[in-house]
Amino acid sequence: MRGLCLPIGLEPEALRRLNDLISVRTRVQRKGTLYRLGDRFASLYAIRLGTFKTFVLAANGREQITGYHMAGEIIGIDGLGDDRHTCQAIALEDSEVCVLPFGELDQLAVDVPTLRRSLFRLASRDLSRHHGKMLLLGSRSAEERLTLFLLDIAERYQARGYSAHEFVLRMTRGEIASYLGLKLETVCRLFSRLQDEGLLEAQGRAVKLLDMPALKRLVGQEVEADRASIPAVG
Amino acid sequence: MRGLCLPIGLEPEALRRLNDLISVRTRVQRKGTLYRLGDRFASLYAIRLGTFKTFVLAANGREQITGYHMAGEIIGIDGLGDDRHTCQAIALEDSEVCVLPFGELDQLAVDVPTLRRSLFRLASRDLSRHHGKMLLLGSRSAEERLTLFLLDIAERYQARGYSAHEFVLRMTRGEIASYLGLKLETVCRLFSRLQDEGLLEAQGRAVKLLDMPALKRLVGQEVEADRASIPAVG
DNA sequence: CGTGGTTTTGATCATAATCAACGTCTGTGG
DNA sequence: CCACAGACGTTGATTATGATCAAAACCACG
C-alpha cells in the first residue's frame, strides 16, 4: 500500500513521516469528481491509481482543461491560496487517491524542514511546469503544442516505469484540444499529419511514438548527448 | 520605509515579524538583472518601486516573457522548486527591491503559522493567477488577450491606488506580444483597432481605457452587479 | 443492433503571421 | 540646440494557419 501512495519528489525522511498521516484512501470512479471549484481546501490528494483532469469553466460554460494528473502525482494544491479550490478535478478512469489532510501536513512540516521544502516545491511545481512547458505554448504552432503534449505524457509514463514510446491516452481529442488551446478537429488532423510523416502511429487513443528524435527536434528540444552546443545568449 | 516594502497579501501579524528580517534594499536600474536563470535561489524580492519582467529564453534564443511584476509584488518564488531560479528577472525602469532571505523566512515560518500560510499562498498565487487569467488565454483571440492584459494591468494599478483608467505601460509592444503569444505587429493593430472602436485611447505607451464595461464584455467578464445571472453548469 | 459519444476528413473562411516600408520618439555627441 | 542613430511604433499587402461548418465512419455499450 505505502509504495504507490507516496508522492514522487519527496525526500525519504519526509516520506516516512508522511506515511503516518495517510489515513483515508478513496476510490473515485470514471467521471467522478474529486473536488469542485469553490470547495473548501482541506486536503491534498496523492493519486494512487488512475488519471485525473483539472479544469475551470469559461464564461460560456465550456470547460477549459488546466492539467492532467497521473498516478504518483499530488493534486489539490491549487486550493492553498484562498482556502478554496480554484478548479474542479474529475477522474478520467476509475481511480484511487490517498487523502493527505493539509492541517496535519502543515503541522508536520514544522518539525521536518525537508517536508516543508517539499511542500513548497510541490506548490511551485505546477507553476514551474507551466513556465517550462505550457507557457511557452503560447508562442507555438498547433503541431508543436501537440508534440509537446505527447512528449510530456511520454516522459511521465517513463518516470513511472512504463514505455515512453507506446501508451494509451486517457483523454478525448476534445480534451486534448481544450488543454492545448486548439479545436478538436485540429488535433485530429495533427494526429493524421504526424502519422503521415511517419513520426507516430495513432489508432484512436492508442499512440506509438515512432521517431522520438524527430519529435524532439520538431519542438526545438536538443536531442540529448550534446547540450554543450546550445548557443549562449548574452 | 517599511510601508512599501511589505508585500500585499500577507496578514498583519506576519508582517510585523517580517519587518525584522528585511535587511537589504537594493536598487536595480533599468535593464538591470535581478536574477538569472540558474542562479541559486536564496531570497525573495519585494518590489518596492518600479517594474520587472520575468522571462525564459526559447530554443532559438528569443525571449519569452512569463510575467510582469509591479511595486508591492514579490518575485523570485520560481526558484523554490529546484533551488535554482527558472527564469530571469530584469527591471523595466529604475527600481528598488527589498531582499527577503529565504532561509530566515523559512525559519520564521516555523513559529508563525500565518506566515507559513502566506508563503504557501504566495507560491500558489502565480499559479492561480495563471489559472484564472492567463491559462484561459490559450483559447482566446488576439483581441481578447490584449484586452485581458490591459484589464489585468488596470486592476493591479487600481489595487495600488492609481487610476485604473489611465496609465503608462512600462513595456514595449514587442514585450506585450511575447507575453501574450502574439507578434508585435498584431499588438499594434489591436491597439489601433480598439482605439477606432472607441474602447481606448493609446499614444505609444500611454493608455486610457475609455469604455471599461465594453472591454469587460469583450472578454466575457460580467459587468458587476449581477453575478447571480451566470448560469450554473452541472 | 441501434444509439450516443467520439474520431476522422473535406471545403471554406477568419485570424493572425509574415514581409516590407515608413513614421516617430529618445538620447547622444557635435 | 540641433542632427543623427537606433530603437520603437504604425500601417499595408499577402500568406499560412487554424477555426468553422458539415458529413461520415467508427466504436463501445446497453
Image: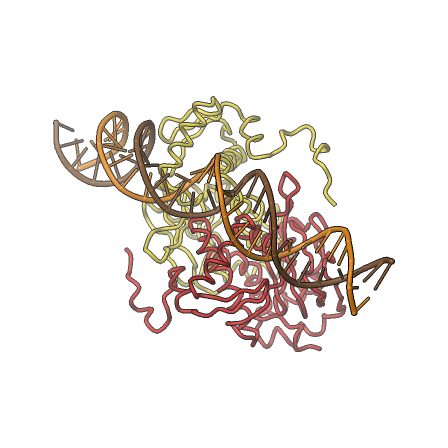
Chain colours: A yellow, B red, C brown, D orange
Image quarter of residue A113? bottom right
Observer-nearest of B194 and B125? B194
Q: Residue at x 43, y 45 (%)?
A: A181
Residue C19 or B22: which is nearer the viewer?
C19
Q: Is residue A117 left or right of residue B228?
A: right
Identify the residue at image location x=50%, y=28%: A163
Q: Quadrant of the N terminus of chain B?
A: bottom right
Question: In this rendering, does residue A116 appear at all?
Answer: no
Which residue is drawn at the image coordinates 76% and 66% (left, top)?
B26
Q: Quadrant of residue A95?
A: top left
Task: List x then y, in percent, for residue B52.
Answer: 65, 61
In this rendered view, identify the residue nearer to me: B66 or C14: C14
x, y percentage for residue A158?
Answer: 53, 32
Q: Is residue B58 above or below residue B35?
A: above
**Which residue does the image show at 44% across and 56% down from the upper left?**
B144
Quadrant into which the C terminus of chain B falls: bottom left
Q: As drawn, is B24 to the left or to the right of C30? A: left
Q: Where B93 sits versus A207, above or below?
A: below
Spot occupied by residue A179 in the image (x, y as percentages of width and height): 43, 45
User: Would residue B115 be seen by someone viewing this image from the given angle?
Assistant: yes
Disc count in the image? 0
